[in-house]
Image: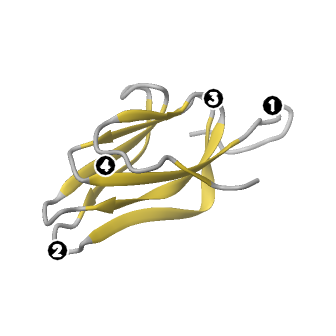
Amino acid sequence: MVKQSSGEKTSSAIIYSGQCLYYGFVCVTGGVNRTISIYNNTANSGTKVESFTADANKPTDGHSHANPVECNNGLYLEMSGGTVIVFYCPAKFNSDLPRMAI
C-alpha cells in the first residue's frame, strides 16, 4: 500500500470516502495556534480519531502514527485555519480478522 496525500487543504473537508488507513498530518501554522481534528466519517461527527493543536511558535507542526488508524467510514478534516496536508491510504478491511476498533 502506498500512502497518499490530501494535497494542501485550507478549510475543513472530506479527505476520503470509504475505508482507509490514517497516518497523520502536517500543518503550516502561519504563526497562529491551529486546531486540527480528524474524524472516522465523511463529516465532522462520529468517532473523532485525533484532535491536535498545532503550535504557533513552529512554522510547521503535526502528528504521525507509526501504526496507522483504521477508518471504516471515511476521513474528514476539521481545521481552524492554516494549511493542512493529511496522509492516508485507501484500504479494504477483512471483517473476519480480529483488530482493534476505534
Disc 1 element: loop
Whichever of labels 4 and 1 marks the residue nearer the N terminus, that label is 4
Whichever of labels 3 and 4 marks the residue nearer the N terminus, that label is 3
70 vs 36, left or right, is right
Foreground: disc 1 or disc 2: 2
Foreground: disc 4 or disc 1: 4
Q: Residues within 10 Å of mark 3 (few under 14, many from 20)?
A: some
Q: CA distance from mark 4 to mark 2?
A: 16 Å
Whichever of labels 2 and 3 marks the residue nearer the N terminus, that label is 3
Residue located beneath label 2 in the image:
57
Whether tag 3 and tag 4 are in contact, CB under 8 A, the answer is: no
79 versus 84 height, above or below: above
Q: CA distance from mark 3 to mark 1?
A: 15 Å
Residue furthest right as drawn: 96
Residue located beneath label 1 in the image:
95
Q: CA distance from mark 1 to mark 2?
A: 43 Å
Q: Nearer the viewer, residue 39 or 6?
A: 6
Whichever of labels 3 and 1 marks the residue nearer the N terminus, that label is 3
Whichever of labels 4 and 2 marks the residue nearer the N terminus, that label is 4
Q: Nearer the viewer, residue 82 or 54?
A: 82
Foreground: disc 3 or disc 1: 3
Residue 27: image x %, image y %? 33, 60
Residue 23: image x %, image y %? 56, 56
10 vs 2, left or right, is left
Q: CA distance from mark 3 to mark 4?
A: 21 Å
Q: Amino acid at mark 2?
A: Asn
9 versus 29 height, above or below: above
